[in-house]
Image (spheres, rainbow, N blue to C red):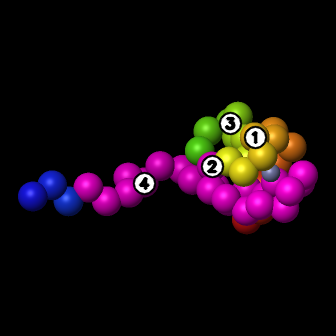
Amino acid sequence: MADLKMKKLKTKRYKCLDCGNEFQGIGKRVVCPSCQSENVEESN
Ligand SMILES: [Zn+2]
């Protein structure tokens, strides 16, 4: 029984400045999953 929980990757919260979608992203180049925009900002 593999208990694969979410690994502790450095997920940060982002907010898309185009559509207002809030999501979690990993890495440096984060795009909005909703509108594919790169116009996002971190929202801690
Ligand atoms: Zn968006």
What are the residue bounds of the magenta stretch?
4-25
For the point 68% across and 48% down, the residue is 33
- Which amino acid is tagged 4? Lys
Residue closer to the observer: 4 or 21: 21
**Among numbered discs 1 and 4, the one appearing first in the sequence:** 4
Q: Residue furthest right?
A: 18
Give the CA separation, mark 4 to mark 2: 13 Å
Direction from residue 23 to residue 3 in the image, left or right: left
**Is 2 on the left-hand or right-hand side of 7?**
left
Residue identified by numbered label 3: 28
What x and y, as percent, mark residue 20? 84, 61
Q: Which mark is residue 36?
A: 1
Q: Which residue is mark 4?
A: 8
Where residue 7 appears, x then y in whole percent?
A: 38, 52
Element type at mark 3:
loop
The crowd level at tag 1 (other Cα within 10 Å; few <14, some 14-19, many 20+) is: few
Q: Amino acid at mark 3?
A: Lys
Q: Quadrant of residue 22?
A: bottom right
Type of amino acid under label 1:
Gln
- Between disc 4 and disc 3, whose residue precedes? 4
Distance of label 1 from label 4 (alpha carbons) = 25 Å
Q: CA distance from mark 4 to mark 3?
A: 16 Å
Q: For marks 3 and 2, give the CA distance.
A: 9 Å
Dot 1 and dot 2 residues touching (CB under 8 Å): no
Instruction: Mark yes or no: residue 24 visible.
Output: yes
For the residue labelled by badge 1, is the local secondary structure a helix, a strand or a loop?
loop
15 vs 7, left or right, is right
Residue 8, quarter of the rendered image: bottom left
How far apart in space, not on screen, are marks 3 and 1 (Cα)?
Answer: 15 Å
Q: Which residue lies at the image location 86% right of the left edge and 56% below the top edge?
A: 19
